[in-house]
Image (cartoon, rainbow, N blue to C red):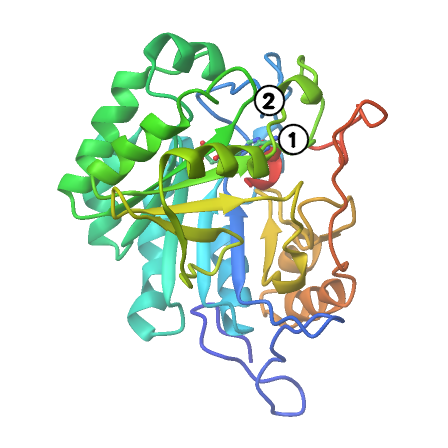
Amino acid sequence: MALSDGTPTLDRAGARPRALVDPFARAITYLRVSVTDRCDFRCVYCMSEHMTFLPKVDLLSLEELDRLCSAFIAKGVTKLRLTGGEPLVRRGIMTLVSSLSRHLASGALKELTLTTNGSQLEKFSAELKAHGVERINVSLDTLNADKFRDITRWGDLNKVLAGIDAAQAAGLQVKINAVALKGVNEDELASLVEWAHGRGMDLTVIEVMPLGDIEESRLDQYLPLSLVRARLAERYTLEDIDYQTGGPARYVRVKETGGRLGFITPMTHNFCESCNRVRITCTGTLFMCLGQEDAADLRTPLRASEGDQLIHSAIDEAITRKPKGHDFIIDRKHQRPAVSRHMSVTGG
Ligand code: SAM
């Protein structure tokens, strides 16, 4: 029978649920869960200013999200990241973090983490740590308050910085994620490196991806990281290191600061061959690839029965459709988004 506490369950033949291996022999061990599509920021590269959000009735309850996550854990997922929208604005989110932490205690889950814009970290850092979260990613593209406001439209840099202070004070390991934006923060990336490393935080830079319609042209935003890396290499000694966090970043150590710098290059260097992840949205839709439209509805099987057999079958079937990879292009001929949904739907 299926257990929603993540204990591997038995199928009809009495075997454990099948682990998740896709048609390209990639084991799926990493689940990213967008707990809400809403956010208290409106980053110009992520959302349009006037977004239409999902009606609240369409959302999975926290209990349903827990059940869905637990089904994936029963099928071999060992790393789970909560994201959004902004995960910390979902009402009652700590109830979900707290209940999922039982899978850390059981050893089924190796890591429970989240990606946040940092605006709520003053409030939640201590609780996150108490529930077994060890590392978090904070998205921060600039240390200039005016620029921060321009990028996020609604954000307050000081609040985010205070959130990062609170997270570090609570003992959370913080990694900073910065999207490289042409003409916006490209002159600031070296100072971001020094600031992050000076505070004992890794920094990862990310290429902007063509997801969802926004007001600006992607071509105006897109800054290839090959260029960023070449520029940083003029200033610092970048030593390749074999550091892995289970994500797509390739890391170097910056000799002068001693800190780690990651590059996530969905545009210039596709990393799909080692993809170990899938994503679910707050309505229970499973996306097998960030850059493709194909998806599977897990809400219907979730609600159709109290046991998890139907969910397990739906997950198995969806994984057989995991594509080889994405094919993002940003150039003059390709001005349309690769997929229609915004990053806030699937959470990066
Ligand atoms: N609100 C949380 C946050 O700010 O981290 C979690 C959700 S946010 C969608 C996750 C990450 O996606 C952030 O680091 C954000 O900068 C990044 N992001 C959003 N849209 C993007 C795009 N079109 N290309 C690349 N990164 C994007």
Residue 90 percent across, percent down from the top left? 43, 34
In depth, the one of 103 and 268 nearer the eye is 268
Q: Quadrant of residue 104?
A: bottom left
Circle 1/circle 2 CB separation < 8 Å: yes
Q: Which residue is mark 1?
A: 342
Residue 284 percent across, percent down from the top left? 62, 49
Q: Residue at x 86, y 25 (%)?
A: 333
Q: Quadrant of the N terminus?
A: bottom right
Cβ of mark 1 under 8 Å from ligand 1: the answer is: yes
Q: Earlier in the sequence, mark 1 or mark 2?
A: 2
Vertical relation: 320 (above or below) 287: below
Q: Which residue is mark 2?
A: 47
In depth, the one of 101 and 328 nearer the eye is 328
Q: Quadrant of the C terminus?
A: top right
How many neighbours does mark 2 have within 10 angstroms: few (below 14), some (14-19), or many (20 or more)? many
Disc 1 from disc 2: Cα separation: 6 Å
Give the amino acid at mark 1: His
